[in-house]
Amino acid sequence: MITAQNKTFHIASDNTSYIFRVTSTGHLENLYYGRKLRSSDNLKALYSKRTLPVANAVYYSESDSNLFLETICQEISTPGKGDCRESSIVVDYNNGMETLDFIYFEHKILPGKPRSFSGLPESYGDKNTCTTLIIKLKDTVLPFILTLYYTVFEKTDVIVRKTVFSNNTDQSVTIRNMASSQLDLPSAHWNLVSFDGTWARERNITKRPLEQGITILDSKTGVSSSRHNPCFFLEEKDGLDCYGFNLIYSGNHRELVEVSPFGHTRIMNGINPSTFSWVLPSGDRFQTPEAVMTFTHDGIDKATQQFHSFINNHIIRGKWKHRERPILINNWEATYFDFNENILEEIAENAASLGIELFVLDDGWFGTRNDDTTSLGDWTLNTTKLPSGLDTLSETIHQKGMMFGLWIEPEMISKKSILFNEHPDWAVIIPGREHSTGRNQFILDLTKREVREYLIKTISDLLLYANLDYVKWDMNRIFSDIFSTHSYNLREFNHRYMLGLYEILERITNSFPKVLFEGCAAGGNRFDLGILCYMPQIWTSDNTDVLSRTAIQKGTSTGYPLSTMGCHVSASPNHQTLRRSDLESRFNVAAFGILGYELDLNKLSIQQRKIITNQIVFYKKFRALFQYGLYFNIPCDENHIRWGVTNFDRSKILVLDFQIKTEANPSFDIIKVPFANPDFDYYFRPRAQKVSIRVFGDLINILSPVKINSEGKLSKMLADNYSIPCEEEGYIISGDTLAYAGVKLNSQFRGTGYNNQTRIIGDSGSRLYVIQRVEKENLEKK
Ligand code: DGJ
């Protein structure tokens, strides 16, 4: 609900209030964002006080000589009138003049959320789920109009903002910065939680206390990038208040947090001004991407859940919204570029028999592509590898009862390609300057209409010809050497590229509403809300190492729902780290997302086949919970990682207990599940996983009647055919005991013996605990 009384606006969700007012000078002063307030009457106590002047600061006007814009919390900010913090709007008009002063003009409140058709992806909702406030501000001197949009999604406690600038002068002006949103908080006792990294280390969590000064998280790579994700949180240093922020955009972005000398915190996010400006002709308007924010008094886990719910309900759209996502096999790490029809068909046959639902053919099926130096842009079949055609392969896969999916990288072009020979000017290359390239490939100039039309036609034809159910849309390099043969200010290129990409995605996904699209960019280099508006899932990272994945998935899931995260079980040793790990543990971690397998199924041993078959049965049984359950990061010591998911009434709970490294003579593990329903009784047990006999090495001889060389053929043959069940352990436990005291688990292996209750976990080992409610009458029987 949104109310406007006496020029005070109260944007209320189920549990939060966001309040600002129009000051006597017409500025918008933020009064409060936090736990829900009963009403917005009598809020004078929250007005910033102007009882004395501030030294060495600029006062607003002669008539308001105690108003210092630097010291008040504002909804937007401009240069030139005394607020010397970072400005949210900078427009260069009249040959370098930048001073602007926006004051209230008019407003309206609408049920639901109007669509803007701006070419940018947007959140959506109807009158039952959201309400929108539109406020118009005008400059005190020039005919510039600034329109602020606030949409509150009541149930998810999320507010979405955007800003529109209209140039009603008779001259062009240049926008130098235009944040989507600005929030000024009256305090500075916050830790900034961000998601940072690079290729194969995406979205690892960084937490730092704020101090006076500016902290910037951004991307200048051309994509939202793995360097800094647009999602971030502010956590109260000694409390549970938490704000979450994100941006519905996939290009260069900037998140700026500034603590002022007066202990205020300014937070703004939007397009990155360091790689952007926009020439706005007379009579035209510019619209920012949408910014997303949430607040909770219940800590970051709750803010995470609010974002999950918001994304699942108001970002993801189309057929796959709320739908369980298929378990896939991807041939990339099994074959890389080296495959033929027989190999693929054998992998598909094995996949189908294991219960896998979707077969994805990755890179290398087109042009003359046998490595990464050629053929991007030539989306026609490599007939040497696939002489029978993609349509035939697709039919073969469908006959096996699986869906068929294909990898493409439409935004790119290789120099060695027919497309490049025909259209060298479609590649983003500066004439006369040596190009700094990435992965031997060039970016296609999506700012050109003819390039967009070519891609839409080519990809649409491919989807029809190959009868695709799924597309993996990859994008493997970052931007350099920006240039276009189209004439516009090149500082507009990055944003124009994004608008071009969004047009392509909008038209293709609308034409193929049944197809499941998965975003990908050298792993997780473009994991953002913009992409999720078109593609309901994204490949989280090329790094499938079990330990690395715990950090990558933990960070990613703090901002994004598990139903958006592609997570694959791959081979051991891992191809990114060479670390060896247990197949069961790789599954336990990958299950907290959209499960897939990316290893050579044609080489599995009998044991591995049995293990994977059981994993898939288990995942299918609990898939709704893994993909759409309420997600928790469970507090634990530094040697463990614990995640939990549960259903709405908490009658079913799954908990991952992951151990980073084995200790000799280890301490005794206790698992608490703080979110268990205290009124329920539960049965607690580990998923029935297997332990390879190879973990025992030479010690196998203590149990074996015949002498076995642990490095020899017999040992391998035994391990391929036989494994032992994990420990027997199961308890009936009340929800309050589980939540407050926890379960004291059986001892881990400690070098003093072994029996069927011994927990063999190891380095990067894990268990998945299944905790299900038991009705009173069944308690006895357990
Ligand atoms: C990068 C992706 O992240 C990988 O999964 C794979 O599709 C390769 N590209 C193929 O070139």
Image (spheres, rainbow, N blue to C red):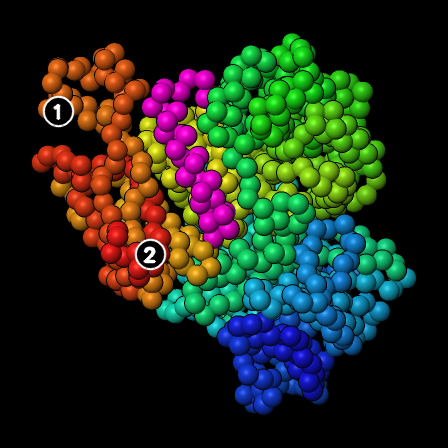
User: Which circle's residue, 2 or 1, is located before the other in the chain?
Assistant: 1
* Residue 580 locus on image (x, y percent): 33, 28
- Which image quadrant for residue 774? bottom left
Q: Which of the image's four quarters has the N terminus?
A: bottom right
Identity of the amino acid at label 1?
A: Leu
* Residue 464 locus on image (x, y percent): 74, 28
Front residue of this view, candidates 495 and 3: 3
Looking at the image, residue 134 sits to the left or right of residue 241; the answer is right
Q: Give the range drawn in magenta.
A: 601-629
Q: Mark 1 points at which residue?
A: 703
Ligand 1: does it lie within 8 Å of the C-beta at label 2? no
Secondary structure under the numbered disc 1 in the rendered image = helix
Q: Mark 2 points at which residue?
A: 774
Q: Distance between the residues labelled 2 and 1?
A: 38 Å
Q: Is residue 243 visible?
A: yes
* Residue 721 locus on image (x, y percent): 30, 20
